[in-house]
Image (cartoon, rainbow, N blue to C red):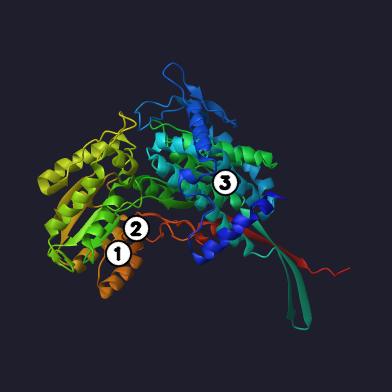
Amino acid sequence: MSLYQQHLPTLERARQACRERHCWSPYPEMPAKYPSAEQAQGKGLQMFEQHLGSAQGRRRFALDQPGQIGWLGEEVSPYTQAPLHIDYPQADIDTLFEAAGQAVPSWARASIEDRLGVLMQVLDAIYRDHLFEMTHAVMHTAGQSYNMAYAGSGVNALDRGIEALVYAEQAMRAVTPTARWERSFGPSSIQLEKTYRLVPRGVAVCFTCASFPTWNAWPSMMASLATGNAVIVKPHPATVLPMAISVRVFRQVLAQAGFDPNLVTMALDSKAEPIGKQLVQHPKTAIVDFTGSVQFGQWVEKNAYPALAYTETAGSNTVVLESADDLDAALRSLATTLCMFSAQMCTSPQNIYVPRQGVRTPDGVVSFEEVGQRLAGHVAHLCSEPKKAAMILATIQSPQTLALLAQLHEEGQRRGRVLLKPAAYSHPQFPQARTSTPLMLQLSTAERDLYAGERFGPVSFVIACDSADDALQQATGDVREFGGLTAFLYSTEEDFIARAEQAYASAGAQLTTNLTGAMPLNFAAAYSDYHVTGLNPAGNASLTQLAFVSSRFCIAQSRRPARSAT
């Protein structure tokens, strides 16, 4: 059986899930449900530890790719706040582009089935042989909890990779390879044979972010590779290991399948000497996939031309609290989502808009001040037990986030009311972990400069508005001006819900209404939930739809007079 035939049952199920948007995944959602879980987890930890160096000697990550000019590595674990002591090969940029360009022609000539089969095999190899190694790598670079690193950066990211392949296949198969065309011109009948070739654009550069390196990278890489392009991965200097492992797996599977492994390479830099702009503006860059800061994302969108740019940055994700059947259930769900990975997710809510006159409930109106106090109480409860906090809050990825919290706390004391003061909590497994409980400020719209735009990390703002309509207008205004990926609404009024759905749709944010219970409000399900709309400053690309893949290749046709059948 070919690789495509081996993986066809999974692809067929994924196609169906994408069509019907239902819940499906080929992967177990919890680490304990993984086959031979205890053995696999132990092996994964051992594999991770084998990457680590020590103060007595750094460990070199073996990655056989062209153009090596040195070694780089500056990762620090948010859990131990100690260096990982891993060095990775630094490569000459021009050499990587040359090698990638040479690898494209034979890959582009391969059939759609062959390319999809190889890429499905890559995802299968990551799942079978590297999933728990990857889990620990994400933990000790991005700072996620063990369960989130497994689920969000592991199996859910693999799902997003398959999803990208489904849409890539759909886009490519929409182009017929050949056609016979006939038309009369006066007394003459012209018959032509036409051939349509899918031509990749060339070399894609994939930037990965510090807090979720694999979640956006794997689908972006799959989209480019499936359509015949090569990929140069540019990891964030703080989270290299997950992408180094990924690149090595891609290269191994490509080589085993008889293709040039230089279809996937890694370009490494340091915080002191970044190479991002060089990569974006390199004359051989055809595609740029960027996930990261708003500032650099906007620069990419303005300066990538003639390369295509697919971006996802961040925004001011908003909440409107108008009314609720069960206010405490709504606030508990909101509190959990505010705490999830210390709000270091592009979908974390930030600006919570509440009518100044309060929130209507079946028991009467709950005042604006009490809504803020109750929400702060639910957040404080989640943070009160270190074991629970470790599972939900995890760690703070960057020291810069702690500095931002301190600055906002000081300003909030002067200009508003501090509902929750941030403080480090003691992680039960890693006493040196970089941690913080959330900061929550109560403000009015007069302090908009404090909350306008994304404030990355565990900080939220409870904001008094003149009315429910004003709250909706303020919230959707944030989305339009600063970007927004997700939005959340609580209301018992169907007319208000309808207005909010239309307002958020026009602003380009994905809206969740009246959700309570165990599911995190910002959970994005592969095959069902679209991630980013491309309609506001939070990014121009969406995971996953045809537009994410269809422009990564072009169509070149040839035609000639039809030949007689013999």
Q: Are marks 3 and 2 in contact (CB under 8 Å)?
A: no
Residue 125: image x %, image y %?
59, 42
Res 486 label = 2
Q: Label 1's element?
A: loop
User: What residue type is disc 1 on?
Assistant: Asn
Residue ranking furthest to the right: 566
* Residue shown at the point (12%, 65%) measured from the top left: 357
Residue ranking furthest to the bottom: 187
User: What residue type is disc 2 on?
Assistant: Thr
Q: Label 2's element?
A: strand
Residue ranking furthest to the top: 56
- Residue under label 3, please give it: 123
Cα distance in 3D space between marks 3 and 2: 28 Å
Q: Earlier in the sequence, mark 3 or mark 1?
A: 3
Direction from residue 9 to residue 500 in the image, left or right: left
Cα distance in 3D space between marks 3 and 1: 35 Å
* Residue shown at the point (34%, 58%) measured from the top left: 486
Above or below: residue 57 compared with residue 212: above
Residue 20: image x %, image y %?
51, 66
Cα distance in 3D space between marks 2 and 1: 14 Å
Q: Earlier in the sequence, mark 3 or mark 2?
A: 3
User: What residue type is disc 3 on?
Assistant: Leu
Q: Earlier in the sequence, mark 2 or mark 1?
A: 2
Q: Nearer the viewer, residue 84 or 394?
A: 394
Q: Which quadrant of the figure has residue 189?
A: bottom right
Q: Are marks 3 and 1 in contact (CB under 8 Å)?
A: no
Query: Of discs 2 and 1, which sits in the foreground?
Result: 1
